[in-house]
Image (tube, rainbow, N blue to C red):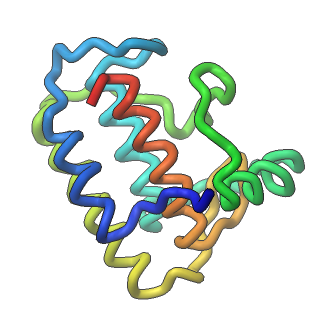
């Protein structure tokens, strides 16, 4: 089965689902609030967009096994299996709607960068350097995971 991708075709669907998120939406698993999830997603998209430098703290098993399994569509996001890297921990939000818009804008920027150069590499801390094409698969899995977390 081919993995999902975060590209122009799928971004609209993800964004529409995310627009339904409210500050008081309860998650069905995990510890994140709706605000936490927005902050977390934005930070990861900002990294893939090159707006934030990430350290390469990749570990062998994720770099050499996890990434290929993800690219083959064989690595689902299972709640509680991987803990987020400290750089992606959520921060308190002053304005929920402004943060939601920041995430949507970061998603649009990612799609533009992906279309311009899918082979451009950017570091994700635990997986190392990944092409924007690989990021698109990770973003699809990760975004779907959090949308399911909030029943969206």
Q: Position of residue 68 (x, y in %)?
A: 76, 59
Please, is residue 78 above or below residue 75 in the view?
above
Say whether residue 62 is left or right of residue 24: right
Residue that protrudes farthest toward the bottom in the picture: 116
Of the 4 image quadrants, the one containing the N terminus is bottom right
Viewer-proximal residue among 55 and 113: 113
Viewer-proximal residue among 112 and 12: 12
Say whether residue 73 is left or right of residue 128: left
Please, is residue 145 above or below residue 22 in the view?
below
Residue ID at (15%, 48%): 101
Counting the numbered discs, the total is 0
Residue 92 seen in render: no
Q: Position of residue 39 (x, y in %)?
A: 34, 36
Please, is residue 102 above or below residue 132 in the view?
above
Q: Position of residue 12 (x, y in %)?
A: 22, 59
Residue ID at (41%, 61%): 6
Q: Position of residue 82 (x, y in %)?
A: 67, 29
Say whether residue 138 is left or right of residue 37: right
Viewer-proximal residue among 131 and 122: 131
Residue ID at (62%, 55%): 124
Residue ID at (32%, 77%): 112
Residue 2 seen in render: yes
Of the 4 image quadrants, the one containing the C terminus is top left
> In the figure, residue 72 lies in which quadrant?
bottom right
């Amino acid at each position: 089965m081919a993995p999902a991708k975060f590209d122009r075709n799928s971004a609209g669907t993800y964004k529409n689902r995310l627009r339904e998120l409210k500050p008081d939406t309860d998650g069905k698993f995990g510890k994140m609030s709706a605000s936490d999830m927005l902050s977390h997603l934005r930070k990861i998209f900002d990294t893939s967009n090159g707006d934030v430098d990430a350290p390469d703290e990749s570990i062998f098993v994720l770099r050499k096994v996890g990434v290929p399994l993800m690219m083959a569509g064989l690595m689902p996001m299972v709640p509680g299996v991987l803990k987020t890297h400290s750089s992606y921990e959520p921060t308190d939000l002053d304005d929920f709607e402004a943060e939601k818009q920041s995430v949507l804008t970061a998603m649009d920027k990612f799609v533009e960068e992906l279309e311009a150069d899918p082979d451009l590499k950017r570091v994700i801390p635990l997986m190392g350097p990944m092409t924007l094409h690989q990021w698109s698969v990770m973003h699809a899995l990760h975004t779907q995971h959090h949308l399911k977390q909030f029943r969206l």
